[in-house]
Image: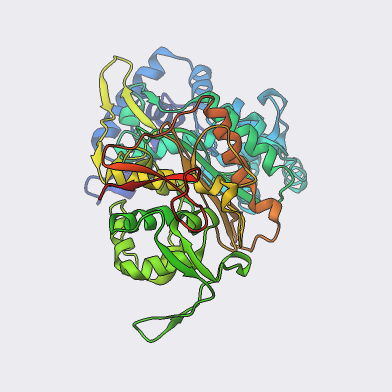
Amino acid sequence: MEDHRFYEHRGFDPVGILRALKANISEQGNVEGASTISQQYARLMFLNNDKTWSRKIQEAFLTVRLEAHYNKDTILQGYINTVYFGHGIYGIENASLYYFNKEPRDLDLNEASMLAGVINGPEYYSPFKDLKAAKSRQKIVLDALVEQNQITQKEADQTYQTEIQLNPHPSSTIQCAYPYYRDCVISELKELGFYSEEYVNQGLNIQTTLDTQIQDQLNQIVNEQMKGRDELEVSSIILNSQTSGVLALIGGKDYASSQFNRATQASRQVGSTMKPLLYYIALENGFTPTTKFKSEPTTFQLENGKTYTPTNFNKKYAHDDVTMAQAIALSDNIYAVKTHLFLGEQALVNALSQFGYQHISPHPSLALGTLNTNVYDFSAVYTTLAHHGIYNKVHTITKITNNNGDILYEYQPENKQLLNQDTCLMMSQLLTAPFEKSFQSYASPTMLNYPVNTTFAAKTGSTPYDSLCAGYNPQYTLLSWVGYDDNREMNMTSDTRIPKVIFQTMANFLQKEELWYEPTTNLKKIPINPITGDYQENGLVFWFKET
């Protein structure tokens, strides 16, 4: 399919060259077609895919050297062991295992002709992505084999009509144990400008922030929780709170069935995991852990003449004043919207813009997390809160060198003081409230049934279609999401609890000894009654700014 005169020419196909010259005679700078397997192999190994005359000249020179130093079988073997077959798979052996769970020598004509067709366009002709297109391409391959007298028309017809038996568990054959993390690294390579054959063929050595022990543990708990969950999907990320380096990442429950990386590519609402940023703004504007609003069914009259009527989860209200600490513990939506409107809707929009979120419309519902994003991007909010307000870009790559040892790239932390340190410390202490049983009242603290062995800040979030849990301590930041790709509602409580279970399990795995913040001299510790907010000698301790 790629070069049927391969064994007849010396690296260049005169017929193909004449065809390409004719097609490109009027072009300026761009060249197309005419590549033999020898030329493709030279390009795969040493060059990039730029369609320029200079690249074609280099390719021709390297092709001559290949043909001079290696016999045809060796060149063909090299090509078929390096060509791309889709799904992150390179080479015939990996492709055979991935698509059919067979060694190449064991492929039958049906399977071999299918794989031969994939090479031309893995994104289009992978039978896992589009079986109809793959069969259409396979027919072209079989017709070519008939034309070249390699098989009979009867064999071609019988093969085409035979049902293809694909590998039911292709992910088990993927050599990369962390495919979603790998794809994230590749995306970052592209952003940095190093994902081109110009650099890749130098032999890139990429140092990442991956912690395999943490990734393995995350894989294990996600696999356990997602078993038998049909179409329910998941994304999860764990970061170093100090550096914003990604230690572990999962973008779905099965890479083989879906390479869509929900950790980096999804667009989902964050729900009440938005509230810590909202309450940070409130603390900056004179609120304290004991600032009160009344929690009751409320219809808000908006400036544009419209109304907005949010509800609490399960429509449970205090019908009384509640403190910020209690509102955080129980995730009270009325308190959040009142805070949001009191501060002015633009305040939260401005805060989000500091984290790169643009073109967000101010609206009362933004307080309840109607922002669409993903756990990878949104984690920057939490790592900044966790790191005393210091912002660093979320990243996976720390250093890139080539095989000569030349440093091509080295990550430099920005360490930008984006948020106020004291206010972040107050917020962190407030976010321990969801674990505290003494807040049990008109509703239950959101993390009451998911205690952790050491102190962590945490906030849950939910919409009818999403369930999230996010949190941190000085060392680690964790965010997880579950939901359906088609945005159908989640009606099973056992589904919505998964992010909390992931958080609880991973927090206990990560932190064996107590590690928590200390207030600065600008803050004072005050024990309060969790319900009334009054001073109570043996009450829950929160942090207040010195006045």
| Residue nearest the observer in this picture, 97 or 240 | 240
Q: Quadrant of residue 197?
A: top left
**Residue 393 screen position, x and y as percent:** 32, 40
Residue 7, visible in the rendered structure: no
**Residue 31 screen position, x and y as percent:** 30, 43
**Residue 93 screen position, x and y as percent:** 61, 25
The residue at 23%/34% (across/down) is: 54
| Residue extending farthest left | 28
Left or right for 203, reference 533: left
Q: Is residue 198 above or below residue 362?
A: above
The residue at 60%/31% (across/down) is: 95
Residue 351, visible in the rendered structure: yes
The residue at 72%/25% (across/down) is: 106
**Residue 293 screen position, x and y as percent:** 44, 67
| Residue nearest the observer in this picture, 41 or 509 | 509
Q: How is the image coloured?
A: rainbow
| Residue extending farthest front | 537
| Residue nearest the observer in this picture, 190 or 1 | 190
